[in-house]
């Protein structure tokens, strides 16, 4: 081969190598450029529209959680109401504030408190918590002592008795049949009372000294205070 031909081949190879290097450089630059561009877009997403979408999704998630919680609470209340309706037991008063509780110690009682107190204005309607027969009604705690003021005791078919005390007015008589939710009296402040309220007891007998925890008993029947 002549020197001229060798020179031509060498120059052609050099041009091809330079072209390859340049192409590779352009490719690398393009790749790096794309990576930088993608990273920039990702970075911008954290503080731009993507951040807004993320915040919106978070807010929607929180709203969904609250909605689910509210639905669960409503379902629980519906179950309690159904149980209450099925048992046929109810509250003695409406729109009350709970005050002294069962077994609470204090200077107002010779022993621990024997019932659950409902703070209500004088004249509030008092209703029977269940069907039954009135076995005590009148002043002097209906026979249980002056500390109770005017009182009513009702016997129920399950062998339990409900007692209502410190009444301003008694609206039933001994031997009278009553139904759940029927008005039997009006609340007051008679007897050993520090303010207007209804004293409510659940008893195992009609007499003082046989009270059990009324909150626990009523809760077992689906009624909560």
Image (cartoon, rainbow, N blue to C red):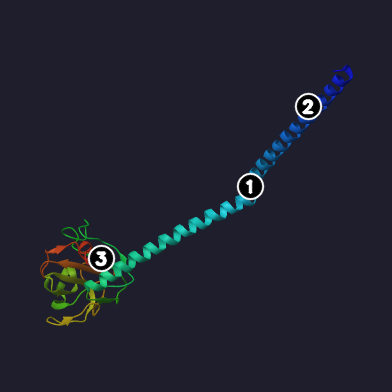
For the C terminus, the image quarter is bottom left
**Secondary structure of the residue carrying numbered label 3:** strand
Residue 198, how many percent across, how many down? 25, 70
> Is residue 41 shown left or right of residue 15?
left
Residue 156, how many percent across, how many down? 14, 74
Residue mark closest to the camera, 2 vs 3:
2
Q: Earlier in the sequence, mark 2 or mark 3?
A: 2
Looking at the picture, tell me which residue is in the foreground, 222 or 215.
Answer: 222
Q: Residue furthest front?
A: 1
Residue 185, how many percent across, how many down? 23, 78
Q: Disc 2 to disc 3, how far (Cα)?
A: 100 Å
**Secondary structure of the residue carrying numbered label 2:** helix
- Badge 3 is on which residue? 117
- Badge 2 is on which residue? 17
Q: Earlier in the sequence, mark 2 or mark 1?
A: 2
Can you say whether 199 is above or below 184 in the image? above
- Badge 1 is on which residue? 45
Residue that appears at 80% across and 28% down: 16
């Amino acid at each position: 081969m002549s020197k001229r031909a060798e020179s031509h081949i060498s120059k052609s190879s050099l041009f091809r190598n330079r072209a390859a290097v340049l192409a590779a450089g352009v490719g690398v630059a393009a790749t790096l450029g794309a990576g930088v561009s993608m990273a920039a877009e990702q970075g911008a997403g954290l503080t731009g529209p993507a951040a807004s979408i993320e915040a919106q999704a978070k807010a929607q998630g929180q709203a969904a959680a609250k909605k689910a919680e509210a639905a669960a609470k409503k379902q629980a209340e519906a179950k309690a109401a159904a149980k209450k309706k099925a048992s046929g037991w109810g509250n003695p008063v409406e729109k009350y504030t709970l005050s002294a509780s069962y077994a609470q110690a204090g200077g107002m009682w010779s022993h621990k408190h024997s019932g659950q107190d409902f703070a209500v204005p004088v004249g509030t309607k008092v209703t029977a918590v269940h069907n039954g027969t009135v076995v005590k009604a009148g002043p002097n705690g209906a026979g249980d002592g002056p500390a109770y003021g005017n009182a009513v005791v009702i016997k129920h078919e399950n062998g339990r008795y409900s007692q209502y005390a410190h009444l301003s007015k008694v609206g039933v008589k001994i031997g009278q049949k009553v139904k759940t939710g029927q008005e039997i009296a009006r609340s007051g402040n008679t007897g050993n009372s520090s303010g207007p309220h209804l004293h409510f007891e659940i008893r195992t007998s009609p007499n003082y000294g046989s009270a059990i925890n009324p909150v626990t008993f009523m809760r077992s029947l689906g009624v909560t205070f």
